[in-house]
Amino acid sequence: MRTLPEDPAMLLSVVNMKLRDAYPSLAALCDDLGEDEAKIREALAAIGYTYDETTNSFR
C-alpha cells in the first residue's frame, strides 16, 4: 500500500512537510514509510525539484 500521493505536486508538498516536521533525512522517511527513494527523487525531478541534504527538502 502506497502511503504517499502519486501526483507530483502533492508528493512534493507532503514529502517536504514530512521532512520538515518528522524526518532528519529523505532516507529516514523512505525507510520508515517503506517507500522507494529513487522513485520519489525521479518523480520530483520530473517537475524540476531535487533533494537538498543541507536543507532536508526538495527545491
Image: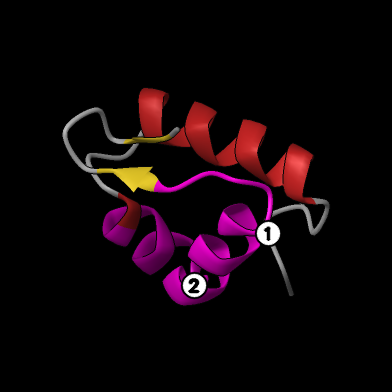
Position of 53 compared to 43: left or right?
A: left
* Three-letter code, disc 1: Thr
Q: Which residues are magenta?
A: 27-50
Going from the N terminus, do you reach mark 2 or mark 1 first? 1
Question: In which quadrant of the rendered view does residue 40 lie?
Answer: bottom right
Tell whether label 1 touches label 2 (CB within 8 Å): yes
42 in the magenta segment: yes
| Above or below 17: residue 14 | below
* The disc label shown at residue 34, or none: 2
Q: Residue at x 72, y 68 (%)?
A: 2
| Residue nearest the observer in this picture, 26 or 48 | 48
How far apart in space, not on screen, are marks 2 and 1 (Cα)? 8 Å
Q: Secondary structure at mark 2?
A: loop
Position of 50 compared to 13: left or right?
A: left
| Above or below 24: residue 36 | below
Q: Give x and y (percent) for residue 13.
A: 64, 31
* The disc label shown at residue 3, or none: 1
| Residue nearest the observer in this picture, 49 or 21 | 49
Give the class, few, some or many, for how many residues have Cα within 10 Å of label 1's Cα (few <14, many ≥20): few
Q: Residue at x 68, y 46 (%)?
A: 11
